[in-house]
Each structure stands twice: as C-alpha cells, then as structure tokens.
Image (cartoon, rainbow, N blue to C red):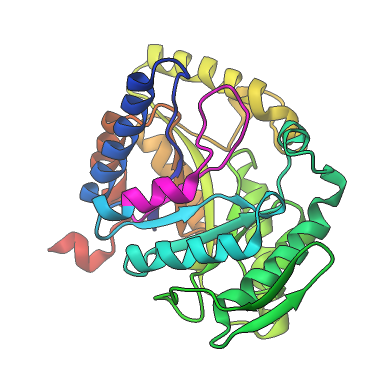
Amino acid sequence: MKFGLFGGARTKRSVGIEDSQGYQSFIDYVVEAEKLGFHSMFMVEHHFTGQGQVSSSLTLLAYLAAKTSRIRLGTAVVVLPWHNPVLIAEQVATLDLLSGGRFDFGVGKGYRQMEFDGFCIPIEESTERFNESIDVIRKALTSEERFSLHTKRWNFENIIVEPGCVQRPHPPMWLAAGSFDSVRRAAREGFNLLLDQLAQTDQIIARVDAYRDECEKIGRPYNSDMVAVARALQMVHSDDERKAAFETRKRVVGVIGDLARDKLADTVEQDTAPLLGMPEEVIARLKQLEAGGVNNILLVDPNASVGNLRAFANEVMPAFQPVAEAAE
C-alpha cells in the first residue's frame, strides 16, 4: 500500500509575514513527508473562501518541485471551467519538466456555488465547460506540430504548447469522481480515479469495483495504482484524544457534509471514512480498504502536522511494507 498527502497550505489573511509562515510550514511538512517515505502530495484549489485555502496550486507545486526530489506532486483538482485550457496546458507541461516527470494532473468540474458566482460563470455550464477544456488540453499536450482549434468558447490559431512534457504522452490525468456514472466515465476516458474523504468504506470499495469492471469491459489495462482514496487522519493514543477526535470529526462533517449528505454515516461513531482511532484501529481500517482493492491512500490532515506524519510513519506504515522490504 502506498501513502500520500491530500490538502494544502492555510493562511490567516492578515499581515504578509503570517501568510508566509503558513506556506512555509506546509512546505516543511511536504519535505518531511518525502523523507518519511510518502509517495505523493495532491494539492487542492479553492478561491474566495476567506479561509486562506490554496488558490494557485500549480505555482505552489512548482516551488515544491524544487524542494523535493522523489515525492510525486499532484493537483486535486484544477477546476477546468475557470481556466484558459491552453494556459493550463503550458503550466502543466512546465511543472512536469521542472519536477522531472513527477506531476499528476488531477482535474474536476467544480462544485462550490460561491466560486462559480465569483467568476461569474453559471455552475449549470460546468460539465459542458469541463468537457470542452479537457479536449483542448489533451490536444495541446499531445500535438507535436502547430495547430488551430475553434470551440464554442475558445479559439486558438497556429499554436504549439511549449515545453514538451517529460511523461508521455502527458502526465497522468486524475478525475475526481463520486457517482457511479462519473466513476465509469473516468475508466472509459483514460483518467485515473480520485475518491473523496467522506465516502464510507463500503462505498469506496463499490466505486473501485465499478471502475475496475468498466476498465475490463473496454479492454483498458487496470492496476490498483490508478485509484487514490482520500482519508482523514485522526490517530489517537488515549481515550481523551479519542473524544477530541470525535469532536473534530463532527466539526469537519458540519463544514463539508452538506456537499455530500449521501456519503455520511448516521453518527460519528458509525463513520468508517476517517482513519480515527488507536494505531491498531487505523491499521485495521486500512486493511479493510486493502482487501477491497485500495492500494493508494491520501492522508488528509488539516493541521499539516509533522508530528502526525511521523507517528503514522512509525506506527502504521510498517504494517504495509512488502515482505521482502520488511525483512531487510
């Protein structure tokens, strides 16, 4: 099983030095994750929140590319309806070059009404705009010669995207999906699959099964590395810490739960989505996911705590080492 990170830096939107410290602590967190053997880091993109969430994920990932050498760097996700697709293609190719071919290109169509309102883009157009943009981006990243392209919203004349990507034909594309229709679409259209942090264990396993079945149906080679599952990390070491973790979970669900009510358990105690509990409980929950075909976990820690990373690396990750590696 591989372990990565999911999230981003946070700032307080006050004086610049505090914002700088917020970003620097997150950078230190990712650098430490690489040292501890974590496989990947997927960065969020959000706008106009007032909560200091990352708005320029590709810029921050380019900086991280210079500070690291092994960990893969991904977006989770670039919301295509808000961006010029050719400018995104150029940034993607540049980041893939700067990282030495370590970039994973996660894309989505967006879901937050406030963000669409801020950009003055009708959210009802999100699917159409996404489809249009992904076609342009694929053309831009794979064309070896100049081309012209005219779509409903975009017009490009005699262009070629530079630089070329290190990964061919382009960096892996990941689609954030939840419904079975979108999961199957990801399989059919060549995307890897990103699954969210709220879905229960049985829901995750069902979606992995649907993705794998659709790949087999269309003759697309499948392996478990093509699916990544975000899971909140709330490892505890005492009953008091467990109580605090439950309260934190309630707050998290209260903030983001309205986005996906169908995925939520009736109570926090019945919630199988987070990695909440003593180390042995976290291992048991991960083993359930592993038995269901999940091999790629992205940890969500809103505090970006180096201490949490080290505890997880020391107390949980050894249970998932390959036999030959563990014996060395």
Quadrant of the frame with the N terminus: bottom left
Residue 320 position in % (x across, y down)? 33, 55
**Name of the residue lying farthest toward the right:** 124
Q: Nearer the viewer, residue 54 or 108?
A: 54
User: Is 117 located above or below residue 42 in the figure?
Assistant: above
Residue segment shown in magenta: 39-64
Residue 261 lies in quadrant: top right
**Name of the residue lying farthest toward the front:** 158
Residue 196 in view: yes
**Name of the residue lying farthest toward the top:** 240
Q: Nearer the viewer, residue 203 or 280?
A: 203
Residue 120 lies in quadrant: top right
Q: Is residue 115 located in the magenta-colored stretch of the structure? A: no
Residue located at (58% from left, 55% from top): 194
Residue located at (40% from left, 56% from top): 73
Q: Nearer the viewer, residue 176 or 169?
A: 169
Residue located at (41% from left, 61% from top): 95
Image position of 327 (left or right of 305): left
Q: Is residue 47 located in the magenta-colored stretch of the structure? A: yes
| Total numbered labels placed on residues in the image | 0
User: Is 180 located above or below residue 269 in the figure?
Assistant: below
Residue 311 position in % (x across, y down)? 27, 34
Residue 195 position in % (x across, y down)? 60, 51
User: Is 85 located above or below residue 243 in the figure?
Assistant: below
Q: Nearer the viewer, residue 163 or 173?
A: 163
Residue 4 in view: no
**Name of the residue lying farthest toward the left:** 328
Residue located at (56% from left, 88% from top): 145
User: Is 114 located above or below residue 194 in the figure?
Assistant: above
Residue 161 position in % (x across, y down)? 53, 74
Quadrant of the frame with the C terminus: bottom left
